């Protein structure tokens, strides 16, 4: 198989990684009010870590692509809210809320979706270029 | 003997430039993919390639042009745009991608024109 779309490997890896990031953001938003997870503790915000990885392209060169290095828990402490009616409340009526900040997640989501779009533009561009090259010699 | 037809400096130079365009597209794709990777340094075509291609074209030496090898390197002029040391700026990359796309159109048309000139010379028909 020849590498007709230049650079499409790194773009595909990036699209995949950004998708993972969007998935994690939606998990965070969905669990913004989960005070009681499977382990009995409030939900902890998750963060996706990216790293650059060298991948061998078909033409033998090493090109840097993107890889998800891991999904880690945000170590920031939970906020306490006064909700005496909540079954998870302690003796003082305080409930530990997840450390998810909706505004932060929304900003992160927009940034991830913009990056996704930029990578799609690269594929489209590579495709247009390949079409031009394929029409060399036609008249 | 047929090789001589495809060994004209103009045709070879357009082919080399097209190789460079494909390589540059690869570099830009990596840069945009790593837009948010901490510490990533942007890649680009080695600046020496263009000057060497110009020199080889001026000398009109097919061997010299054919020996050129475009390569990708870390852009030495890029400055970090974010505190994590990443040197990729999305606007810059998109601009360079569009420039590259134009260069691709130019080089493919140059090659097509060279081939159609050859065809005209061989057949005598102006198509």
Image (cartoon, helix red, strand yellow):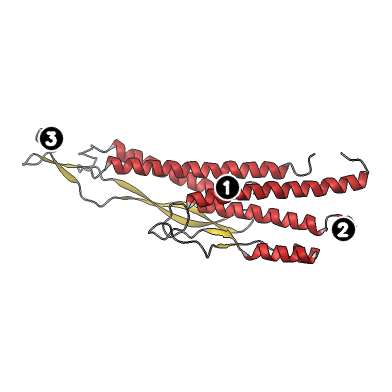
The nearer-to-camera label among 1 and 2 is 2
Which residue, given by chain and number where applicable, does mark 3 sit on?
A87
Q: Residues within 10 Å of mark 1 (few under 14, many from 20)?
A: many
The label nearer to you, 3 versus 1, is 1
Residues at marks 2 and 3 on the same chain: no
- Residue B4's label in the rendered image is 2
| Depicted B77 relative to depicted A139: above or below | below
Q: Pinpoint the chain carrying mark 2.
A: B
Q: CA distance from mark 1 to mark 2?
A: 35 Å
Q: Which of labels 2 and 3 is toward the front?
A: 2
Q: Chain of mark 1?
A: A
Q: Residue at x 81, y 49 (%)?
A: B114
Question: Badge 1 is on which residue?
Answer: A8
Give the Cα separation between the discs numbered 3 and 1. Answer: 52 Å
Answer left or right for A77 relative to A72.
left
Query: Circle 2 — which element?
Result: helix
Closer-to-camera residue (B14/A23) = B14
Viewer can see residue A6: no
Task: Measuring from the top left, give residue B78's x and y in whole percent.
Answer: 50, 61
Query: In which quadrant of the rendered view does residue A38 lie?
Result: top left
Rendering quarter of residue A104: top left
Q: Residue at x 47, y 42 (%)?
A: A116
Label 3's element?
loop
Label 1 SS: helix
Q: Are marks 1 and 2 on the same chain?
A: no
Which is more N-terminal, label 1 or label 3? 1
């Amino acid at each position: 198989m020849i590498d007709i779309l230049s650079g499409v490997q790194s773009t595909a890896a990036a699209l995949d990684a950004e998708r993972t990031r969007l998935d994690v953001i939606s998990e965070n938003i969905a669990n913004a009010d989960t005070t009681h997870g499977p382990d009995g503790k409030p939900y902890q915000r998750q963060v996706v870590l990216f790293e650059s990885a060298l991948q061998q392209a078909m033409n033998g060169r090493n090109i840097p692509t993107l890889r998800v290095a891991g999904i880690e828990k945000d170590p920031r402490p939970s906020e306490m809210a006064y909700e005496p009616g909540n079954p998870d409340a302690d003796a003082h009526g305080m409930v530990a809320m997840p450390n998810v900040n909706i505004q932060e997640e929304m900003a992160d989501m927009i940034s991830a979706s913009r990056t996704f779009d930029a990578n799609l533009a690269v594929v489209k561009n590579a495709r247009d270029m390949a079409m031009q090259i394929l029409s060399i010699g036609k008249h | 003997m047929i090789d001589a037809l495809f060994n004209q400096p103009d045709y070879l130079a357009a082919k080399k430039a097209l190789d460079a365009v494909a390589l540059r597209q690869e570099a830009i794709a990596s840069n945009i993919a790593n837009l948010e990777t901490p510490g990533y340094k942007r890649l680009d075509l080695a600046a020496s390639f263009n000057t060497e291609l110009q020199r080889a074209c001026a000398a009109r030496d097919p061997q010299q042009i054919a020996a050129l090898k475009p390569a990708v390197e870390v852009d030495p002029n890029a400055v970090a745009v974010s505190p994590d040391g990443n040197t990729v700026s999305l606007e810059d990359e998109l601009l360079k991608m569009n420039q590259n796309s134009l260069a691709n159109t130019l080089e493919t048309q140059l090659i097509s024109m060279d081939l159609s000139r050859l065809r005209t010379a061989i057949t005598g028909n102006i198509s």
